[in-house]
Image (cartoon, rainbow, N blue to C red):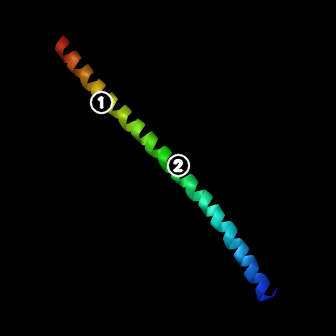
Amino acid sequence: MDTEKVAADLAKHEAVCAERWKTAFKRFDDMDENVKRIETILISCAGAIIVGGCGLIIAMSQLH
C-alpha cells in the first residue's frame, strides 16, 4: 500500500465514522428526552402516592 491509498482509506473512514457519530448523538438526545419524561412521571406518581397515603392516615385517624 502506498501513502495515497492509506490517506484515501483514512479519509473515507473518517467520513463514515463522523456520520455514525451524528446518528449516535441524535439517538442519545432522544434517549435523554425519554428518560426525562419517565422521570417526571415517576416523581408525579410518587407524589400522588405520598399525598394519598397521608390522606388515608388522616381519614383513619378521624374515624377512631
Q: How many marks?
A: 2
Q: Secondary structure at mark 2?
A: helix
Q: The residue under label 1 is which amino acid type?
A: Ile
Q: Could you tell me which residue is drawn at 32 percent across and 33 percent down?
A: 47
Left or right: residue 20 versus residue 58 is right
Left or right: residue 59 versus residue 22 is left
Q: Nearer the viewer, residue 10 or 62?
A: 10
C-alpha separation, residue under disc 2 versus residue under disc 1: 28 Å
Looking at the rendering, which quadrant does residue 21 occupy? bottom right
Q: Could you tell me which residue is drawn at 80 percent across and 88 percent down?
A: 2
Mark 2 or mark 1, which is nearer to you? 2
Q: Could you tell me which residue is drawn at 23 percent across and 21 percent down?
A: 57
Residue 64 at least partly seen: no
Residue that mark 2 sits on? 31
Q: Nearer the viewer, residue 6 or 62?
A: 6
Q: x, y percentage for residue 17? A: 66, 67
Residue that mark 1 sits on? 50
Q: x, y percentage for residue 35? A: 47, 45
Q: x, y percentage for residue 28? A: 54, 54
Left or right: residue 38 versus residue 18 is left
Q: Secondary structure at mark 1?
A: helix
Looking at the rendering, which quadrant does residue 62 occupy? top left
Quadrant where the N terminus is found in the figure: bottom right
